[in-house]
Image: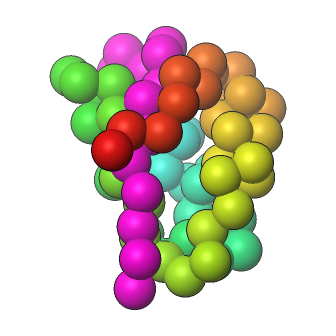
């Protein structure tokens, strides 16, 4: 299993957390998504995760994708 962590701007409550996690888990290859609203980060685990799909999903949910964290 591989993973990635991304920065997301605009998550500020538990509803946002659940919304982002649920939306990202629908993406092919994503097995788990854990949002941290305090730090504005989402940790993703799975196989062959496409960063472009992650960005598109975050933006379609109404949040700002602020890049992948190393």
**Residue closer to the observer: 1 or 18:** 1
**Residue closer to the observer: 40 or 18:** 40
Q: State the extent of the magenta-drawn residues as a range.
A: 1-16
Which quadrant would residue 63 be assigned to in this image? top right
Which quadrant would residue 29 be assigned to in this image? bottom right
Image location (x, y in percent) of residue 13: 35, 21
| For residue 19, above or below residue 29 | above
- Image quarter where the N terminus lies is bottom left
Image location (x, y in percent) of residue 23: 63, 51
- Specify the farthest residue to the front: 70
| For residue 52, above or below residue 46 | above
- Whether 10 is among the magenta residues is yes
* Tally of numbered tags: 0
- The answer to whether any part of residue 27 appears in the image is yes
Image location (x, y in percent) of residue 15: 44, 31
- The answer to whether any part of residue 15 appears in the image is no
Q: Residue at x 42, y 57 (%)?
A: 4
Q: Residue at x 34, y 25 (%)?
A: 40
- Specify the farthest residue to the left: 38
- Image quarter where the C terminus lies is top left
Image location (x, y in percent) of residue 50: 69, 62
Give the image's coloring scheme.
Answer: rainbow
- Whether 33 is among the magenta residues is no
| For residue 54, above or below residue 58 | below
Q: Residue at x 38, y 48 (%)?
A: 5
| For residue 23, above or below residue 1 | above
Q: Residue at x 77, y 39 (%)?
A: 56
Relative placement, left or right, of 45 versus 29 is: left
């Amino acid at each position: 299993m591989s993973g990635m962590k991304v920065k997301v701007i605009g998550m500020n409550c538990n509803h946002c957390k659940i919304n982002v996690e649920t939306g990202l888990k629908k993406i092919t290859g994503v097995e788990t998504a854990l949002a941290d609203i305090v730090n504005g980060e989402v940790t993703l685990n799975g196989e062959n995760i496409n960063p472009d799909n992650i960005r598109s999903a975050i933006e379609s949910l109404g949040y700002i994708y602020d890049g992948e964290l190393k």
